[in-house]
Image (tube, coloured by chain):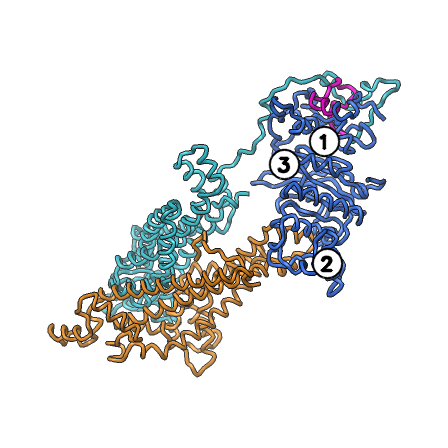
Chain colours: A orange, B blue, C cyan
């Protein structure tokens, strides 16, 4: 049920267009980050040593880091550095260690959690959405709606806190993450998926309800099919296809959630690192991490859009709706 | 042609809808008989209740609608009394089928048409595997789709409108229903395709012997296919009879007005006839004859009491006070008389005097 | 009821019938024809706002939260004026021992207890709510103005649509979290920074919704028809476009407030929130979090969280309820 015969050319065009868009976005983001970074307080490059150094000594340090050069020179060397894979050197967090080196070991943890979270969200969210649509207006629907309301209305920062607090007590799960204890994976991964579950559920529910109003459903009814069969064979089947549309938003949400959760559970991932370096005011680290996160976001969205186009045999090239 | 037995008898059906908290009476007491093997056409303007009436016979009224009173006896069951969705499953699609108006959106875009026809066989006849496939292929052949073996694996968007309607018809008649209801089946199609589809339904009716009910506002279609005609206005059936009787010997002022509105009856150079006014607001209770306010030839009693059904012949009935012996003799409008003269039909008889 | 007509008999048919249904034979005369009587059809009892109100008032859950929210908001602003209220920043010292009233559990003196340095939690919570609400309202208002304005232009002026859509796609690709964190980090945490940062990220969503609605509706046939009839643009906007927009705008605005509060808590946790000297819900939650592991001190976390949740849930439910009620497609 992929693109139709003529569709493959369309698919390619669409992919290329999205790729270019993503690259442009990346470029803009990178440049914006760089420019913003120039506004950062200078203390971030010194750490404790700030007060101990004299004015000229500080200048010397900044000079060495290239921070006193004219902006276009800085921009140039910045891009050059990026292409080399050099994101600068940490000043406070891990003195004189290249930023990339500090971040690298953390990536696997974040990735793993992120993927697991999205997988859980997909399965649980879609199931919830189907259940809600099937029992529309009745107890099940209201129950899940309550969940969605809660997750959306109460700030992430708040309910995740309570989950950590009470679930660890109730279920005897470890409070902090420990890579040697498998059970410590459960809560963080679940927590990361909660927001996305709600999103998928509502999306699925809305879509299924919309499909129920379509003409071909009326025909299916007129055939004499029982409601449950119509639900499964006609409605759900058609609904799964555009679910991919929500995937990009889900990715974004997982990134956001991960920053907080990693910090809460002391997971040695990138999100937790970001919180740390912000608190320590290590500018190069902040810059590096922001760049990486933004890139992940952009790439993730790009892939998500591609996936969506893959599933939908009716790609609209000129989108009349700015989605997401 | 009709022969003898009535397979469906609807009496005094009253159907209401809940609209923004108020009750709207869409059908105000409709009675109808359907005979074995006949073709009945229900005609009327938009909003007269044609679709609502037939939808109620398969339990597909909108959520906010219900059958308030009346009965519809079919195979020993009163369809009007069915409340549970599950009870409809033995009737819908199996005994009474529907064909809808718009073939472009009627089919599931993500399933092959073969699969969609197959569903019906699997559901009602318990067929599966090869047997179901053969049944599907046979059905496709019957409705005139070439190369059925290959085409059954194709998707709806690979078929034209006319072809899709054929598929919809195939789905509807696959289980050899007793009644096929066609709700404006040709309105969304080209004129040339219209004739084909009507011909197809006629042929199928002959081969599979079912009763067809057409809902339409197109009198041309009626003239083509109908044995009997029922005219609806404001939720009531105001006149029923054989096609010739309704066309050439109509008695109800609304039928006169409807026929007069045919553009074919217009005289070149003179304004076309149209019925003044609009149908009544069905939220309100209607006193007397619903058509009276728009009827220049209305009697005073039309505003006072609802006319009962009068028999013009054993097969022809109309609900109008004009057929009451006390009513004065009123001629149909000139356009009607002209039409009859041109076509050589019988002129209007005396008020209710025939047997 | 079919009446077969009778052609002959002892009584005249008329007489029989007259006797049967009691209708005065005089009625069987032609009536005067009033053409206007036929025109009186029409179902024009529809009023958009009345239907919206009806839909909203039928929603019991929404009404409950409405009452709750109004009560909370009213109380938040009335609270300082009540007698016997303490200052949120004052540190209370036991006159007898000279020690601070630290971590006192809720009692008659301190209704919500005190925090780790002896400040009255009751006063702090309501003060914090005021602060957070203030941020939320300012941000919400700015978002509404900028969002609607921008979205309207984006949607209505065809020539700009393509360009702006591309820009939007770029901007939207960046996770909001990152932007907020970055802006707060650079501009140094303060009340102003928070407002600026959230406004910068928030208006885009509303602009997108407004733009989508306008694009969909602008070219609908009934609008084309209106334009052909010569309806002035103002009237088209007011009567044709606005009802669809209201639903979307109200929803977004109502949701932006819990969103703002949420971001505030998040940023505070990271250390980019308001300075500790200004009580805010974010600060209070964070302070409570630091001591949440000891069960007897948990009240310091619970109280702010409960108040916060009541507010955010109320806004969320009300926003959705109003949006549903004002959507013309739901006006059966």
A144 is within the stretch colored magenta? no
Residue C82, given in percent of the width and then of the height, sits at 31, 51
Query: Crowdedness of circle 1 by 10 Å Cα count: few (<14), some, many (20+)?
Result: many
> Is C112 rendered above or below residue A117?
above
Residue C254, given in percent of the width and then of the height, sits at 40, 52
The stretch of residues the image draws in magenta is: B317-340
Q: In percent of the image, x 76 and y 59: which residue is there? A: B125
Q: Is residue C297 visible?
A: yes
Q: In the rendered image, which residue does mark 2 sit on?
A: B136
Disc 3 is attached to a residue of which chain?
B
Residue C20 placement, left or right of A186:
right
Residue A108, given in percent of the width and then of the height, sits at 41, 77
Q: Are marks 3 and 1 on the same chain?
A: yes
Q: Secondary structure at mark 2?
A: helix
Q: In the rendered image, which residue does mark 3 sit on?
A: B47
Query: Crowdedness of circle 3 by 10 Å Cα count: few (<14), some, many (20+)?
Result: some
Disc on the earlier residue, 3 or 1: 3
Number of the label disc, if any, that sits on residue B238: 1
């Amino acid at each position: 049920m992929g693109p139709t015969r003529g569709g493959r050319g369309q698919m390619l065009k669409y992919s290329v267009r999205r790729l270019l868009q993503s690259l442009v976005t990346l470029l803009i983001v990178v440049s914006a980050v760089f420019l913003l970074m120039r506004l950062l307080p200078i203390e971030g490059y010194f750490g404790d040593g700030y007060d101990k150094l004299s004015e000229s000594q500080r200048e010397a340090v900044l000079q060495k880091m290239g921070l006193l050069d004219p902006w276009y020179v800085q921009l140039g060397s910045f891009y050059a550095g990026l292409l080399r894979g050099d994101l600068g050197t940490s000043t406070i967090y891990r003195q004189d260690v290249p930023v990339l080196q500090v971040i690298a070991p953390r990536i696997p943890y974040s990735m793993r959690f992120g993927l697991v979270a999205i997988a859980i969200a997909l399965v649980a969210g879609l199931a919830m959405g189907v259940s809600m649509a099937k029992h529309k207006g009745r107890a099940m629907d209201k129950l899940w709606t309550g969940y969605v309301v809660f997750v959306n209305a109460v700030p992430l920062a708040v309910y995740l806190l309570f989950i950590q607090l009470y679930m660890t007590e109730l279920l005897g799960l470890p409070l902090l993450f420990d890579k040697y204890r498998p059970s410590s994976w459960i809560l963080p991964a679940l927590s990361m998926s909660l927001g996305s579950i709600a999103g998928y559920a509502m999306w699925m529910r809305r879509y299924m309800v919309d499909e129920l109003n379509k003409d071909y459903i009326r025909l299916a009814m007129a055939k004499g099919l029982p409601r449950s069969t119509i639900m499964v064979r006609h409605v759900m089947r058609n609904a799964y296809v555009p679910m991919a549309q929500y995937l990009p938003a889900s990715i974004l949400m997982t990134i956001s959630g991960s920053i907080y959760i990693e910090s809460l559970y002391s997971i040695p991932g990138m999100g937790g690192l970001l919180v740390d370096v912000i608190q320590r005011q290590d500018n190069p680290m902040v810059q590096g991490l922001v760049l990486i996160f933004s890139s992940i976001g952009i790439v993730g969205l790009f892939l998500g859009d591609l996936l969506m186009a893959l599933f939908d045999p009716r790609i609209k090239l000129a989108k009349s709706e700015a989605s997401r | 042609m009709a022969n003898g037995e009535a397979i469906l008898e609807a009496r005094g059906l009253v159907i209401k809808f809940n609209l923004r908290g108020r009750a709207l009476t869409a059908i105000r007491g409709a009675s109808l008989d359907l005979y074995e093997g006949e073709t009945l056409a229900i005609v009327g303007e938009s909003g007269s209740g044609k679709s609502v009436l037939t939808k109620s016979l398969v339990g597909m009224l909108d959520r906010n609608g219900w059958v308030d009173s009346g009965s519809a006896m079919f195979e020993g069951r009163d369809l009007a009394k069915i409340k549970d969705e599950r009870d409809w499953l033995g009737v819908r699609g199996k005994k009474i089928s529907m064909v809808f108006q718009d073939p472009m959106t009627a089919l599931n875009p993500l399933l092959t048409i073969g699969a969609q026809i197959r569903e019906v066989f699997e559901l009602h006849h318990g067929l599966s595997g090869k047997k179901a496939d053969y049944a599907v292929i046979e059905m496709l052949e019957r409705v005139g789709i070439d190369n059925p073996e290959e085409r059954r694996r194709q998707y709806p968007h690979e078929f034209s409108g006319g072809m899709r309607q054929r598929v919809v018809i195939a789905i509807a008649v696959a289980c050899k229903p007793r009644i096929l209801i066609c709700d404006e089946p040709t309105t969304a199609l080209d004129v040339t395709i219209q004739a084909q589809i009507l011909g197809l339904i006629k042929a199928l009716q002959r081969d599979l012997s079912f009763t067809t009910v057409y809902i339409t506002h197109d009198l041309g279609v009626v003239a083509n296919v109908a044995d009997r005609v029922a005219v609806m206005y404001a939720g009531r059936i105001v006149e029923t009879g054989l096609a010739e009787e309704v066309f050439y010997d109509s008695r109800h002022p609304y039928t006169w007005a409807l026929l007069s509105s045919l553009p074919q009856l217009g005289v070149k150079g003179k304004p076309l006839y149209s019925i003044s006014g609009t149908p009544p607001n069905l939220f309100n209770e209607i006193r007397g004859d619903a058509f009276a306010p728009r009827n220049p030839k209305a009697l005073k009693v039309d505003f006072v009491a609802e006319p009962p059904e009068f028999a013009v012949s054993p097969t022809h009935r109309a609900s109008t006070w004009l057929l009451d012996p006390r009513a004065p003799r009123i001629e149909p409008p000139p356009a009607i008389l002209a039409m009859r003269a041109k076509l050589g039909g019988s002129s209007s008889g005396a008020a209710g005097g025939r047997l | 009821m079919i009446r077969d007509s009778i052609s002959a008999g002892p009584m005249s048919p008329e007489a029989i019938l007259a006797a049967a249904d009691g209708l005065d034979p005089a009625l069987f005369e032609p009536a005067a024809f009033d053409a206007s009587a036929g025109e009186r059809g029409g179902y024009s009892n529809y009023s958009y706002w009345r239907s919206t109100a009806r839909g909203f008032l039928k929603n019991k859950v929404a009404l409950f939260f409405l009452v709750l929210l109004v009560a909370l908001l009213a109380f938040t602003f009335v609270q300082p004026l009540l007698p016997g209220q303490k200052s949120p920043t004052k540190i209370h010292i036991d006159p007898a021992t000279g020690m601070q009233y630290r971590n006192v559990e809720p009692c008659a003196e301190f209704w919500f207890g005190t925090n780790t340095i002896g400040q009255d939690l009751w006063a702090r919570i309501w003060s914090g709510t005021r602060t957070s609400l203030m941020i939320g309202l300012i941000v919400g208002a700015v978002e509404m103005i900028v969002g609607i304005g921008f979205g309207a232009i984006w949607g209505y002026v065809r020539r700009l649509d393509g360009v702006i859509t591309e820009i939007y796609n770029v901007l939207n690709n960046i996770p909001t979290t990152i932007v907020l964190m970055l802006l707060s980090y650079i501009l140094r945490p303060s009340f102003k920074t928070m407002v600026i940062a959230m406004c910068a990220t928030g208006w885009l969503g509303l602009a997108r919704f407004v733009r989508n609605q306008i694009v969909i509706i602008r070219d609908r046939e009934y609008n084309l028809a209106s334009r052909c009839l010569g309806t002035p643009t103002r009237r088209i906007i007011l009567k044709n476009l606005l009802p669809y927009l209201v639903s979307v705008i109200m929803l977004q605005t109502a949701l932006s407030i819990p969103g703002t509060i949420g971001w505030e808590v998040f940023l505070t946790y990271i250390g980019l929130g308001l300075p500790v000297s200004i009580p805010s819900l974010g600060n209070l939650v964070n302070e409570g979090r630091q001591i949440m592991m000891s069960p007897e001190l948990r009240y310091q976390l619970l109280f702010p969280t409960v108040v916060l949740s009541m507010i955010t849930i109320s806004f969320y439910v009300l926003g959705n309820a109003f949006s549903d009620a004002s959507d013309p497609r739901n006006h059966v």
